[in-house]
Amino acid sequence: MGIEASIKTLAGKFDVPLSIESITSIKSGHINSTYHLKNALPNQPDVILQKVNQQVFENVKHLMENQVLVTEHIQNQEKYRNLVAPLIPTKQGKYWLEYEGEVWRMHIFIKNKKTFETPKSAEICRKAGQTYGTFLKALAEIPAAKIHTHIPDFHNIRFRLRQLDLAVERCDETRIANVESVLSEIENYRQEMCSLFDTATNGGFPIRILHNDTKLSNVLIGTEELGTVIDMDTIMPGFVFYDTGDALRSIAVNTKEDDPNLGAIRMNPDYINAFIDGYVDGTEGILTDLEQKSIPHSGGYMAYIMAVRFLTDYLNGNVYYSISYPEHNVDRANNQLKVCSLFSSLDI
């Protein structure tokens, strides 16, 4: 059976009026396989059909239980209803389909909004911040204990540094010699980044329900004040600076995270301020003073953790992240360390 016939068979197992006019593969994501199914039926929405990557997400049941709980909670609040895309159940009433060893899900296609890989204006950054901040606020009443941690220690810098230290111990001397300067730079920030994490884990920050992958391209933005949050596979409990940091490290700089030209990396303070203003407004006063103070420099924390992960992967033989050349992860690590340094010197 060809891919188009397979998709039509799979789509027919979901409880939605659908006559498929066309099938478009969406290439913007890097993990799951995603298809836009255009609906030929009048007054019926298009849909998104997505295969969940079980190589990356080993506990799909917990992942989907998180997504269903969060989506239904938001959909039941009138003022937040457009903040997420409605899930479509199967004809058996489940929100994910297990079929021939694979896991599929479907949700409504959101019209008149689009994603941005890079910010085009401060207004886009403000809307992204407003949307992510409102997402946090909309989930504030769900006890964090109800949300599964299906990827343990995802943004735990002490855990990531232990992984790096172990990779260094196991790596051959030649490979270590290639990255001595990178390791030295990581060591320069170790205490500062661990201090923020330790303050949070020792009770300084409340545990909140987070998106955990808040890059700009995970918000659909249109003319309305609020966008729509997508790609919710990493919803888990955590600390607010995870979400603000991941967003800021992608919004604030003018280059991609693998650009080897470190001298070309620049920050845009207007974009940073616009995102922060939107985020704080969206949270509607639920943030503590310490949480708010952490936001401007949280991009440095998340850039640092990515640098550590990229370098760890290089020392382990480039087994996790896709690479285009042997030193790709080294360039990524150096790039993110540069971003980390810019956030550390930021005056906001």
Image (spheres, helix red, strand yellow):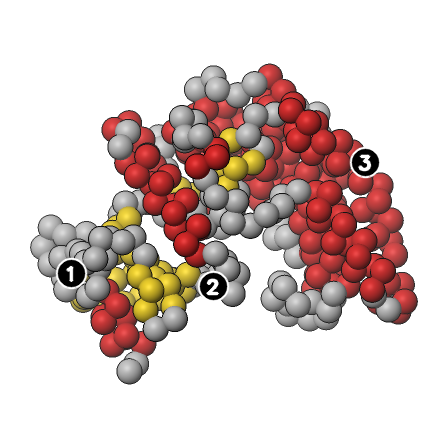
Task: Relative to 80, say whether 34 is above or below.
Answer: below
Quadrant assignment for the C terminus: top right
Q: Residue furthest bottom?
A: 1
Amino acid under disc 1? Leu
Amino acid under disc 3? Gln
Q: Residue beneath label 1, please?
A: 18
Q: Which mark is residue 191?
A: 3
Q: Residues within 10 Å of mark 1 (few under 14, many from 20)?
A: many
x, y percent for residue 110: 28, 47
Q: Residue at x 73, y 69 (%)?
A: 317
Q: Residues within 10 Å of mark 2 (few under 14, many from 20)?
A: some
Amino acid under disc 2? Gln
Q: Nearer the viewer, mark 3 or mark 2?
A: 2
Q: Residues within 10 Å of mark 3 (few under 14, many from 20)?
A: few
Distance between mark 1 and mark 3 Cα atoms: 55 Å
Distance between mark 3 and mark 2 Cα atoms: 35 Å
Looking at the rendered structure, the secondary structure element under dot 1 is loop
Q: Which mark is residue 63?
A: none
Badge count: 3
